[in-house]
Amino acid sequence: MHTEQTPHQGAHIISAKTLLATWGALMVLTGLTVAATWIDLGSDLNVVVAMVIATIKAILVALIFMHLLFDQKFNLIVFVVSVLTVVLFVSITFIDVSSYQPSIRAHESLEPNKPFLKAPAPDPASVQAQPHP
Amino acid sequence: MTATTMPMDTSEPTYLTQARGALSWLLTLDHKRIGIMYLVVTSASLFLGGVFALLVRTELLTPGETIMTHDTYNRMFTLHGAVMVFLFIIPAIPAAIGNFVLPLMLGVKDVAFPRLNLASFYVWVLGALVLVASMYMSAIDTGWTFYAPYSTSKAVGSATSVGTSAMGAFILGFSSIFTAINFIATINKMRPLGMSWFKMPLFLWALYATAIIQVLATPVLAITLLLLAIERAFGLGIFNPALGGDPVLFQHFFWFYSHPAVYIMILPAMGIISEVVSVFSRKHIFGYKFIALSSLAIAFLGFLVWGHHMFVSGQSPLMSIIFSALTFTVSVPSAIKVFNWLATMYKGSIWLATPMIYALAFIFLFAIGGLTGMFLGTLNVDVHLHDTYFVVAHFHYVMVGGTLMALLSGLYYWWPKFFGRMYSEAGARVGAVLVFIGFNGTFFPQFILGSRGMPRRYYAYLPQYQGLHMLSTVGAFILGIGLATAFGVLVYAAFRGRRAPANPWGANTIEWQTASPPPSYNFHDQPEAGDPYDFEGWVYDAGTDGYVKKPAVVA
Amino acid sequence: MTDTASTRPSSGVEVGTEGHAGEHGGDHFLGHHFKDHAHQLNTAKLGIWLFLGQELLFFGGLFCAYAIYRSMHPEIFAEGHLFLDTRLGAINTCVLIFSSLTAAWSVRAAQLNHRRALITAILLTILCAFGFLGIKYIEYAHKIHEGLVWGASFAPSSEAVQHATEAMAHGASSTLTEAHTLSNRLHIFFSIYFAMTGLHGIHVVAGIFAYLWLLRRAIRGDFTQDYYGPVDGVALYWHLVDLIWIYLFPLLYLIH
Ligand SMILES: [Cu+2]
């Protein structure tokens, strides 16, 4: 690995056109993700769409702005491994929490909507802090 | 300002004599000096943590109050745990020995980022000061694990400096991350010509695997402790059930780091043992690739088993079963290492110098520590054994019997390189024997105590446990005397020992090709990398009591 | 750097700057332990990437907390996001994406030895960072004023609640208009919101300091096509800050 340095003369310079095009794509995708919330796809699917768009944006940033497409492959490995470790952490924790959650639900149903915060101070503003129908 | 233009004497200056004065140390970018500074501060932490341990053991001499109140006791074991884990075991081998040895083993002048290296040292100092100061000013009694909701609630107990202690550990985490970044970059980019991945010394493989864990796991601890501190200060409610939060989530966060952290502690130790066992058996290491790759395997599998700390704390049965099963897979690469060390020794000509004595102690004690880990990883057995002295004994067998033995082995092994002086073999052996006896005396009774139901972290206990507790306390004092002897011999050697040859052990890793102690820039000429475990090229030289290259081109 | 006037080659271990003149014939910015600039640049970039890797895990904890609460208590997100100003969030997204462009441009300018373009790009990036923080300040001030704060301090004012209720009625979501009372865990949404955006904001502040440092060095003329590692490194960091926001925006503001 140490022997295969790219000589700095060959360091990759990204063309102005590519940079601007990437930026354009990111802006379009930002518009798209805002627009997607105006359409009701069911809350699950909406999350999926938002995350897919965000991931496409993230990949654009990583590959082009961050040079990963042209860089030493090891940097890409570092990035991917880190992302996968986050995924591992979140998903295993997620599996556990979702499997013990029902027992918490059962317990909480004994006291439905128990307030977790102390009763607000009796000033007029917070007394009517319930949404009107 | 502290420059010393050395008088042109015959011997060239070493890294120790290159520049003098406190500033030349405090502002150094030399990895060797930074390593020595780490060695000093981690040894001081070991001493501090050891004093707390002896106080705890003294208190447990009798079933009731012996020398302190129950509140003081709770603070003492927290201090002992936090100091030993965060200030001593995690940085000891990588930051002290690793910093010194890694660039030398690679035959380079320094680590990739010397200033980051110095920064990591000062970050460590800052973190240590915050941690110790907050514990000193207002005690914490949560144990080193900071479990929510006890740690997040302000009302309970005297636990008032949990927030600042957590911030101390948070800062220490970044010191660990910086060192790891340095090691990975150095190993990746600066290996000399001829040293492919599979010609690297196994200590470097171990440090590499350790660094991967440090980079990937430590930030999760950092965010956990940061959230904990904020939660305490502002009442965030993410972990606090009184606010609708989830305390089990805290344990997931905490153990996602703290289980892999066990491998941050033990992997570098295994690396040292791989070096020492081969050198002192005068035999090529057996199963090189297996030992190398098992380090990576341990690093990987270590990320999949954290839930075995949560079998009885509200984790779902589903995940408990999965975590229990995965826990057993870690024993495979660990056993691969142990069997390869044994196979290396088989038919070797074993030289029982002090590093080897500690290495043998490591193998024996680590085997016990590892095997009792299997008991605890078994779901139903753990229900009985969790939170008892069995657990205490288990992890002390791994951490002290493993990491501390390997640290001592490595210190004795590289001490001639560090300071250019030999230690007294007789004194060192006395220390080693005392450490071994004292250690087993302290912790073996605790296995029995635990399996008979003595819970951990208890201040008072039933009279039936007193005999074993007394045995344990006596053992602790023998261990303390043994460690004092071991370190005393080393310190004496550093100042008064006889001059060490460049290669006292006949080892073939690159650090032995330069003078003891090395000059500031490490090597005169770019050294050659060969098979690190081929000892054929060295021959004993009675004149220096060391080994010299066979072709004898001594000019 | 003052302490080694020594002439011995590569004895510069005490030297405090990145350059160890001597071995590399007076090349001030090449570390004495590197073969050449390419070696140094590639090593530095690996170092930065490892740092970014740990940053991902650092934020990963918060994303984990988010995922857990979002799936276990979806109602607090459905209600909570109504209190946020999507317009400001969207503007900030655009600001940050533009600053990513200028950051990428600064690397290109440095590689091409265009000093003026480099300085302009750095200035624009700093400007965007301040713009982002300004808008964030407006949002935070508004939230705090309305009592829409984290955890135990959560006490929304009636106007805020009114506002959110109207937003519910306007919104496409029909499931929410039925809700008469706010969830008892709503404060956790704001804990997560402030934790995530706050940590992100701290990273933006750190980025400003890094870019000010770069600006000074760029004006001094430190960077050339041979030596531009710091420009590259800071830009990589800045892109990561952008990348995190790319996820934060839909996760916090755009909840259906
Ligand atoms: Cu564990």
Image (cartoon, coloured by chain):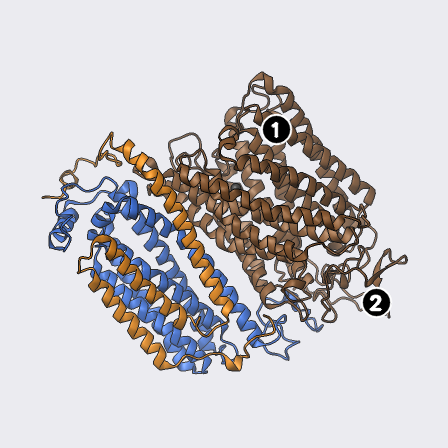
Chain colours: A orange, B brown, C blue
Location of residue B430 in the rendering, given as x and y in whole percent from the top left corner: 79, 38
Is residue C212 visible in the rendered structure shown here?
Answer: no
Is residue B331 visible in the rendered structure shown here?
Answer: yes
Horizontally, residue B544 falls left or right of residue C17, namely right
Asked whether B141 or B550 is in front, the reply is B550
Q: Which mark is residue B10?
A: 2
Answer yes or no: disc 2 within 8 Å of ligand 1: no
Question: Spatial distance from mark 1 to mark 2, Cα to Cα?
Answer: 57 Å
Quadrant assignment, res A105: top left
Note whether B120 is above or below C229 in the view shown.
above
Label 1 close to label 2 by CB (< 8 Å)? no
Q: Identify residue for label 1.
A: B446
Mark 1 secondary-structure assignment: helix
Q: Amino acid at mark 2?
A: Thr
Q: Amino acid at mark 1?
A: Gln
Asked whether B163 or B300 is in front, the reply is B300
Give the residue at the far right of this rendering: B543
Q: Which mark is residue C82?
A: none
Give the residue at the far top of this rendering: B463
Mark 2 secondary-structure assignment: loop
Chain hosting mark 1: B
Residue pictured at 56% horizontal, 46% vertical:
B330
Q: Which quarter shows the C terminus of chain B?
A: bottom right
Reading the chain from its start, which is encountered first: label 1 or label 2? 2
Residue pictured at 74% horizontal, 51% vertical:
B344
Location of residue A15 in the rendering, given as x and y in whole percent from the top left corner: 39, 81
